[in-house]
Image (cartoon, rainbow, N blue to C red):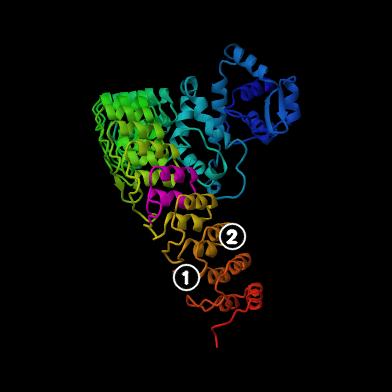
Amino acid sequence: MTAHSTLIWVANAKRPLTVKELQVALAIEPGTQQLDKENLLKIEIILGVCAGLVIVDEKLKVVRLVHYTTQEYVDSIQAQLFPDAQTEITHTLLTFLNFDGFPDSSWINSRQDLPPLVEYSQYCLAHAAGQPEVQLREILLRFLGQAFQWMKVMRGRWNEIYNWNSPPWNYQHHLSEPSALWIAAAANLVETVKFLLEGASLLQQSKNPEIIVASCYGHTEIVGILLEKGANVNAAGEEHESSLQIATAKGHTKIVSILLERGADINVAEGRHGSPLQIAAARGHTDIVGILLEKGADVNAAGGRHGSPLQIAAAQGCTEIVGILLEKGADINAAGGEHGSSLQIATAQGHTEIVSILLEKGADINGVGVLQGSLLQIAAAKGHTEIIGILLEKGADINVAGGRHGSSLQIAAARGHTEIVSILLERGADINAARGFNRSSLQFAAAEGHTEIVSILLEKGADINAAGGRHGSSLQIAAARGHTEIVSILLEKGADVNAAEGFDGSSLQIAAAGGHTELVSILLEKGANINAEGGNLGTALDIASLFGHNTIVSMLLERGARSMIV
């Protein structure tokens, strides 16, 4: 008997059992109200009666069959030798869950471990589906009547520790007191749902609509049963979303079709995620997109935060859905939501193929977003080289500027996108444009330490002494950031070593303030005015003294520096 029960449990468990779980499962006597600890067998005894078919995996700390071929063999003879395996497991688990004092409300916030088998008991209803529902109806209904108490435990603190992954315990929303019918619908207990609805001419409206949870989990047959009994096809769930929206989000195509046939509102847009079509586009459910459009869904519905279905599909990179929506008349230049038009979104996300499709279909190539600027600026910022090429070929304005960082060239220089900088220069970008923070591309590259880009810009004729912004020229900026190699390059190319634009004085004063000893030395060797008095803090010597850069102070004194301070 022990060997028989052990094989049933080990071969049919929804996940491997721990030693303690198996011991408790074998010790439970169906119909009792508490565990008789004298029934607990040592694991050595359990393994012994199984004649080597069952072992303890010491690495994983679980009980399993000795080899995968053993599992295959047991599966092949299951119907003959263990026809009531699921019923036996279900009966044991339901007996356990109905023990006196279970569930203990203290478990919700307690730091102690749950009793063995509690965590595995989440699978009791998964084992119950089918034949056990009928054979164990009385004890099952008793459990369903108080299952909401177990839901409190399983959705309390223990939800953070244990992996509750079986319906209904893993339902995404918290319900205060779900009914037995709701639990049965969530767990796909078809026979139980039928029994509970027997004699009911019409399903009463519930504060926790069963059709919502059945649609969420994809329980097609139960959805049909509930609708036959008068369930409200447009009932709203916990986040004000309908069954159609939820079934769409989960990709349950058949349920979507059933709900539409029963009159579900195809354009309902309550909740955070917009209409069913928007949801299907966001999740990449191509088949459902097709069904919704065939049934008359509004192709340009733009509820929620993310714009129209086309904008959403473009953001997610769903190329096929983008094509379908365009064929059905989607507004290609719609710019609702937070992220601009579909073309701007696809550009920002780097979805090259979608960018090409949208441009071929006539999308506005020079549209400017409120936050991100033009398409070319967006692509330059993100480093999408291929999209840059496509946009330029299609006639994008190369010098359009907007936002904090100016033109596409300025943005690419600031972000360090060397290849894009080269492409833009070859296509005639204004090398000295100084919009945005009033910095040229050279100043941006110098500020961010992009040495190769600095060299490229200088070779292409960038104004080496252009000044703007707080820190002045490219040399002053590079000195402020401590970019030694860039300072050297700029000086070799003829940068004015004594330029003192901005608020902080000359490059020497700036380097002294930052404690950049090597830069101070380089600048002095290149003829920097050691006693320049620009800025608000005095000479380089005054500044180095103020900030405690003693090595620089010594170096400057050796070179004859003087102080402004009397």
Position of residue 6 measured from the top left corner of the image (x, y, whole percent) = 66, 24
Q: Is residue 229 above or below residue 158?
A: above
Label 1 belongs to which residue? Answer: 500
Write down the region rendered in magenta.
Answer: 406-433
Q: Quadrant of the N terminus?
A: top right
Residue at left offset 47%, top offset 70%? 500
Relative to 334, is 165 on the left or the right?
Answer: right
| Main SS, magenta residues | helix
- Amino acid type, label 1: Ala
Q: Quadrant of the C terminus?
A: bottom right
For the residue labelled by badge 2, is the local secondary structure a helix, a strand or a loop?
Answer: helix
Label 2 belongs to which residue? Answer: 484
Position of residue 271 measured from the top left corner of the image (x, y, whole percent) = 32, 42
Position of residue 427 measured from the top left corner of the image (x, y, whole percent) = 39, 42
For the residue labelled by badge 1, is the local secondary structure a helix, a strand or a loop?
Answer: loop
Instruction: Check if residue 422 falls in the magenta segment.
Output: yes
